[in-house]
Amino acid sequence: MAAADRDLYSGLIRLHVLHHAVEGPIFGLGIIEELARHGYRISPGSLYPLLQGLEKKGYLRSTEQRNGKSLRRVYRATRLGRKALAASKSKVRELFHELVEED
């Protein structure tokens, strides 16, 4: 993915992350693998600042959980994150119709 493409897709990636965080707890490697299933290749060096940014804006909340001998930072959507995702759905639906159904 070219740098310009990354800029275009960054909002979609954020929405995708938020969608999964609304569905249930997420963690870095797990969401990297999930995004890869949808054709997004994102490195930990790009994902973790994205997650931290969503947390700083109040869309996600993180906690540390023990995973064997290591600690894993787990993210969940906040009420604000759930509301933002719900509001985004109509915008995404409208864009989808413009991009796909008007061809």
Image (cartoon, rainbow, N blue to C red):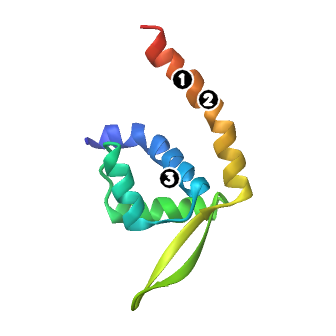
Within 10 angstroms of label 2, few (less than 14), some, or many (20 or more) residues? Answer: few
Q: Is 100 on the left or on the right of 44, as rendered?
A: right
User: Residue 40 in the image: x percent, y percent?
Assistant: 33, 46
User: Residue 34 in the image: x percent, y percent?
Assistant: 38, 53
Q: Is 19 on the left or on the right of 84, as rendered?
A: left
Q: Determine whether 25 is above or below 71 in the image.
A: above
Which SS class for mark 3? helix
Asked if disc 1 and disc 3 are in contact, CB closer than 8 Å, the reply is no
Give the distance between the C-alpha atoms of the residues marked 1 and 3, in whole angstroms: 19 Å
User: Residue 33 in the image: x percent, y percent?
Assistant: 34, 57
Which SS class for mark 2? helix
Picture disc at residue 1: none
Asked if disc 1 and disc 2 are in contact, CB closer than 8 Å, the reply is yes
Within 10 angstroms of label 3, few (less than 14), some, or many (20 or more) residues? Answer: many
Q: Is 62 on the left or on the right of 28, as rendered?
A: right
User: Which is more toward the observer, 14 or 4?
Assistant: 14
Residue found 59% across the figure and 22% down from its top:
94
Q: Is 52 on the left or on the right of 81, as rendered?
A: left
Residue matched to label 2:
91
Residue matched to label 3:
17
Residue matched to label 1:
95
* Res 6 quadrant in image: top left
Q: Determine whether 87 is above or below 99 in the image.
A: below
User: Which is more toward the observer, 67 or 53?
Assistant: 67
Give the distance between the C-alpha atoms of the residues marked 1 and 2, in whole angstroms: 6 Å
Residue found 50% across the figure and 52% down from its top:
17
Residue found 63% across the figure and 37% down from its top:
88
Q: Determine whether 70 is above or below 82 in the image.
A: below
Give the distance between the C-alpha atoms of the residues marked 3 and 2, in whole angstroms: 17 Å
